[in-house]
Image: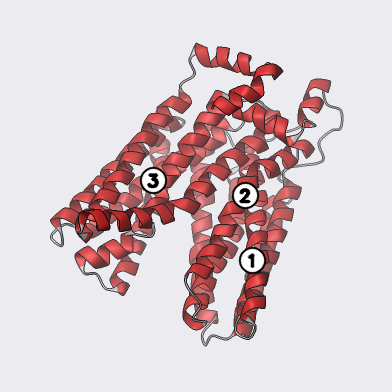
Amino acid sequence: MNNPVLSWLGIVRLGLVQTGLGAIVVLTTSTLNRVMVVELAMPAMLPGALVAIHYALQVFRPAWGHGSDLGARRTPWIVGGMAVLATGGLMAAVATAWMTTHPLFGIALAVIAFSLIGVGVGAAGTSLLVLLAKRTDNNRRAAAATIVWVMMIAGFIVTTGMAGHLLDPFSPARLIVVSGSVSVAAMVLTIIGVWGVEGGQVTSVQPVSNRSQRQASFREAFMEVWTEPRSRRFAIFVFVSMLAYSAQDLILEPFAGAVFGFTPGETTKLSGVQHAGTLIGMAMVPLIGAIYPRSRGNLQIWTIGGCLASAIALLCLAAAAVVGPSWPLRETVFMLGVTNGAYAVAAIGSMMALVGAGGETREGVRMGLWGAAQAFAFGIGGFLGTLASDVARYILTSAALSYSAVFASEAGLFVAAAVMAIWVHRAPARDAMQQRFFDSPATAIAGGARS
């Protein structure tokens, strides 16, 4: 099978898929969220529960990755997943509009719609990253990760801007038309992005050992990946680091309002400062790699450095909560964005580099395992951040001290993630011995349970 290396244009084309994916997701998790709570006066827990369904279904990412491994082709899963996602996005808009006249029926349809969104994101996103990892040159992986994620954020920005313009004056019919247009546009971008990238069908003549490995059951495939020390370690690293990454999302703006007296408009602008820093941090990794070629492929150093720098930025926020309004909050939040962006690109690049490290027959399962860990961390990160701030406020009886304690705890998570990054990339002889032990069918299941 011919596996040509992707050109820069090929990487950008695959980034179009991520742009379409981001466009649908941001419309359903942001715009529809606001419509339900503000225009329809629904309880805020309703969109929160619907988004939780979307995240919960990401636990099946390894299974969808296994499905793409069986066929050894990712394009059908990318296109099919995007079709499911686009259908779910349109159904979510219809369900929201239906809530204006029949709330119960609308909510029931919304549950189905957000379930489809979760399935579509998982199926398309997992196979997209595997395809990108397989076809990207080692020295381009950090840049490829930056391009794809910046294009996803661009999808966020363009969609929210255009949707905000087209939805005024608001009406349920306008909501459905805008959502349908975004879904169609996402499908077009996906087809343009993947057309011809993967090449022809994989030859049906495969070595017997490879064929039997591919046709193993999902449970066998998952246990095989889980008993790979590096894959298991990286899944734990992704969960811990993404938990730290996402835990501050829902408390940063309330913190700025409660401690620094920022207005709602000022806190929204503060989030914009953070996102701008994130984009700069993402661009910084491949840019420095281009200037200093020796650092280009060292994703481990960037990952560890990004985690430690993010921890320092969060400790600065913890100090800001204690010092108060005299602290340069905007500059600190910008620094947090830059460090988070550098960490995110390095971690994604490492994910792309490691996906084939244990053999080509389980790439989809590995990427699915790591994607599930990421989604699970994102799903509970925001909730745990808000819960921790409430508990800390109850114990410490001070808003400033409670936020300081939470930010310091998140910094601790990033330090732990930096240690785990070293743990992931370390490959001592005992890991090889452990892997040979796990390869024994009699010990595979027991070994996976112990881990």
Specify which label sits upstream in the sequence, 1 or 3: 1
Q: Which residue is mark 1?
A: 111
Q: Secondary structure at mark 2?
A: helix
Q: Closer to the camera, 164 or 98?
A: 98
Q: Closer to the camera, 158 or 249?
A: 249
Q: Are marks 3 and 2 in contact (CB under 8 Å)?
A: no
Residue 394 is situated, as x and y percent measured from the top left of the image, at 26, 58
- From the viewer's perspective, tell me whether residue 111 is left or right of residue 260: right
Q: Which residue is mark 3?
A: 244
Tell me the distance, in whole angstroms, between the alpha carbons under discs 2 and 1.
21 Å
Q: Which residue is mark 2?
A: 125
Please give the name of the residue rendered at 55% of the width and 80% of the height, measured from the top-left corner: 166
Q: Nearer the viewer, mark 1 or mark 3?
A: 1
Q: Closer to the camera, 350 or 237?
A: 237
- From the viewer's perspective, tell me whether residue 153 is left or right of residue 324: right
Type of amino acid at the residue the image marks with label 2: Gly
Quadrant of the drawing holding the N terminus: top right
Specify which label sits upstream in the sequence, 2 or 1: 1
